[in-house]
Amino acid sequence: MKQQQMFCQGCDRHVHVLVTDIVEDDAQANVPDPEVVCLEIGDWCTGSMCPLGAAAPSAMVTRLIHSGLPLENLRTVRGHCDACGLDNDLALYGKDMAACLVCGTSQPRPVGA
């Protein structure tokens, strides 16, 4: 994986992104294309599609959570995840959404967050 900066048209500034590795094998099976993972997803991401990763903000947050990278850049609140049933940190993104930092499931933002 390679970290670099790219200009995001959605938030009108340069952001740090992670580009996953390309598999350099001549395999016959389908080889996944490299993905862009925005490391700065947050409240300002209000569109329905991330212009960098060509994915919905919920998918971008899930990519980031599952990347194994430190998540200290995300704004979080303590809350309950309905999907995994745990009380833990939820990453805030978009206008009114949050994602569980354990399972990556998106849900409406907790009241007061």
Image: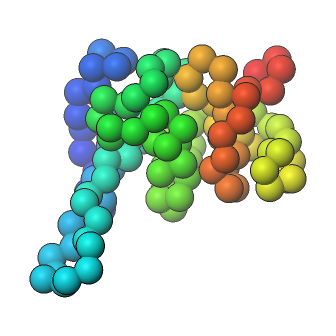
The answer to whether residue 71 is above or below residue 21 is above
Q: How many marks?
A: 0
What residue is rendered at 31% in x and 29% in y?
A: 51
Colour scheme employed for the rendering of this structure = rainbow
The x and y percentages for residue 62 are 54, 48
Give left or right: position of 97 versus 5.
right
What residue is rendered at 21% in x and 66% in y?
A: 22
User: Residue 17's quadrant in the figure?
Assistant: top left
The answer to whether residue 102 is above or below residue 110 is below
The x and y percentages for residue 43 are 55, 21
Q: 68 or 51, which lies in front?
A: 51
The x and y percentages for residue 47 are 44, 20
Give left or right: position of 23 versus 75.
left
Residue 104 visible? The answer is yes
What residue is rendered at 19% in x and 83% in y?
A: 28
The x and y percentages for residue 105 are 66, 47
What residue is rendered at 28% in x and 25% in y?
A: 8
User: Residue 113's quadrant in the figure?
Assistant: top right
The answer to whether residue 79 is above or below residue 48 is below
Question: Which image quarter is the N terminus in?
Answer: bottom left
Residue 13 visible? The answer is no
The answer to whether residue 92 is above or below residue 105 is above
Q: 36 or 30, which lies in front?
A: 30
Give left or right: position of 73 versus 35.
right
Q: 62 or 74, which lies in front?
A: 62
